[in-house]
């Protein structure tokens, strides 16, 4: 029984007017397919491309290339030219040059002469020899002999050497000297410049090399902005002169007084730029072991004084000897050493120096970057340090 006939009639009338069918809730006709209506996406309006404002580039700053060349200039002290450990030595009479070692321990200069032959010419002794390692290679020379000297080293046979007279030039110094001729093939430098050349003319600085002449040190290039307007050169060349610095080092003489730790009296020492390691007179030398380490016991003689010392060995060295003799093994010890107001721990080789004039030899290792050496003076280390002049 339909309780609301009026409502039902209204629904049927609406359905007929719209042409639609009604179905019970939850049911769909078998031949229908769900569709999803594609909706057009909203598009952003296309804007016209805008040109970005171009920033004005700064005008290029004009530049100039500056080339700086640094030139070394020699140093002088008390009017004497300062020489390094090694220099270029010249023989101006022969038009030759070679490397030279500055040796304040050597009384006389010498040259590397080989195949030495003596002969007579006009009743005078002459010598023919080969001079090696020169700027023009090996040169055969003939020169008159001025004299002969005998060189005696401990434990070696005496060597008789001819002496010739030649001019030596180092830097702006030229000095005629009597030069001994000997085979220096086992030495690094073919020329040795001794005290005979250095006296009153030069001072040695073994902490430097090749400082006696002007020479270019370095060249630096850099670009520098130019502030002036108008036409300018594109390059500027500058030469800067740099004087060799002496670093306010004190000056030692050819001989100095040395104070050693454990020795009550000062000792005389030869100041020798040609030797690498300092040397100490050691008599009655005895090696022994202490706490598993090598030690030495010896006596140090100075005049009438004798000092007994025991020290640990830092190392051993082999010293080559001439005449085909076997190398000599020597112990090396470290000792605190004072010269003037300079105190340093220094290595000393130990050997019998009874045949030498002085019990101590003070060598390059102590002197380098510590003191200059003026062979025309003696016992001056207590004076105040002096710098460039």
Image (cartoon, rainbow, N blue to C red):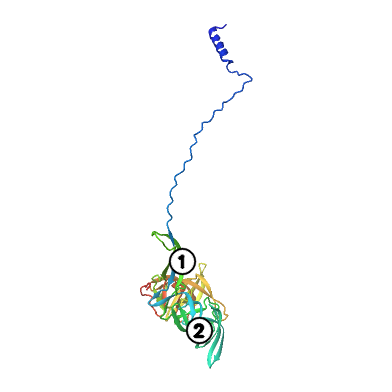
Question: Visible in this render: residue 18?
Answer: yes
Residue identifier under label 1: 219
Quarter of the picture holding the N terminus: top right
Q: Earlier in the sequence, mark 2 or mark 1?
A: 2
Question: Visible in this render: residue 352?
Answer: no
* Image coordinates for residue 76, horizontal then vertical, percent: 40, 75
Report whether 182 appears left or right of 368.
right
Identify which residue is drawn at 51% across, 75% down: 286
**Picture layout, residue 345 above or below residue 105:** above
Report whether 385 appears left or right of 319.
left
Mark 2 or 1, closer to the camera: 1
Residue 15 vs residue 332, the one in the foreground: 15
* Image coordinates for residue 181, horizontal then vertical, percent: 52, 83
How far apart are the alpha carbons under marks 2 and 1? 41 Å
Residue identifier under label 2: 180
Q: What is the number of the mark on residue 27?
A: none
Q: Quadrant of residue 380?
A: bottom left
Secondary structure, mark 2, is: strand
Residue 345 vs residue 49, the one in the foreground: 49
């Amino acid at each position: 029984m339909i309780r609301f006939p009026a409502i039902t009639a209204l629904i049927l009338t609406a359905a007929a007017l719209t042409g639609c069918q009604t179905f019970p809730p939850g049911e769909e006709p078998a031949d229908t397919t769900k569709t999803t209506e594609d909706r057009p996406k909203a598009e952003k309006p296309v804007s016209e491309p805008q040109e970005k404002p171009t920033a004005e580039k700064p005008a290029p700053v004009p530049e100039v290339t500056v080339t700086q060349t640094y030139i070394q200039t020699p140093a002088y002290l008390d009017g004497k030219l300062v020489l390094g450990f090694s220099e270029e030595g010249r023989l101006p009479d022969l038009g030759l040059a070679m490397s030279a070692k500055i040796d304040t321990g050597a009384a006389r200069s010498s040259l590397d002469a080989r195949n030495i032959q003596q002969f007579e010419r006009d009743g005078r002794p002459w010598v023919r020899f080969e001079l090696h390692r020169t700027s023009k290679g090996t040169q055969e020379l003939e020169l008159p002999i001025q004299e002969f000297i005998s060189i005696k080293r401990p434990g070696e046979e005496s060597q008789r050497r001819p002496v010739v007279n030649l001019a030596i030039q180092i830097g702006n110094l030229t000095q005629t000297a009597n030069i001994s001729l000997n085979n220096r093939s086992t030495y690094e430098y073919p020329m040795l410049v001794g005290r005979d050349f250095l006296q009153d003319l030069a001072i040695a600085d073994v902490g430097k090399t090749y400082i006696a002449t002007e020479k270019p040190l370095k060249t630096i290039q850099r670009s520098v902005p130019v502030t002036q307007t108008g036409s300018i050169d594109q390059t500027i060349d500058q030469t800067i002169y740099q004087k060799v610095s002496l670093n306010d080092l004190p000056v030692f003489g050819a001989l100095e007084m040395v104070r050693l730790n454990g020795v009550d009296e000062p000792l005389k020492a030869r100041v020798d730029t040609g030797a690498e390691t300092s040397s100490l007179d050691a008599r009655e030398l005895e090696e022994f072991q202490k706490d598993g380490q090598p030690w030495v016991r010896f006596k140090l003689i100075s005049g009438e004084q004798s000092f007994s010392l025991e020290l640990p060995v830092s190392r051993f060295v082999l010293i080559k000897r001439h005449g085909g003799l076997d190398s000599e093994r020597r112990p090396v010890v470290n000792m605190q050493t004072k010269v003037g107001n300079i105190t340093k721990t220094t290595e000393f080789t130990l050997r019998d120096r009874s045949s030498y004039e002085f019990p101590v030899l003070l060598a390059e290792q102590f002197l380098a970057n510590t003191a200059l050496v003026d062979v025309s003076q003696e016992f001056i280390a207590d004076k105040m340090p002096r710098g460039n002049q």
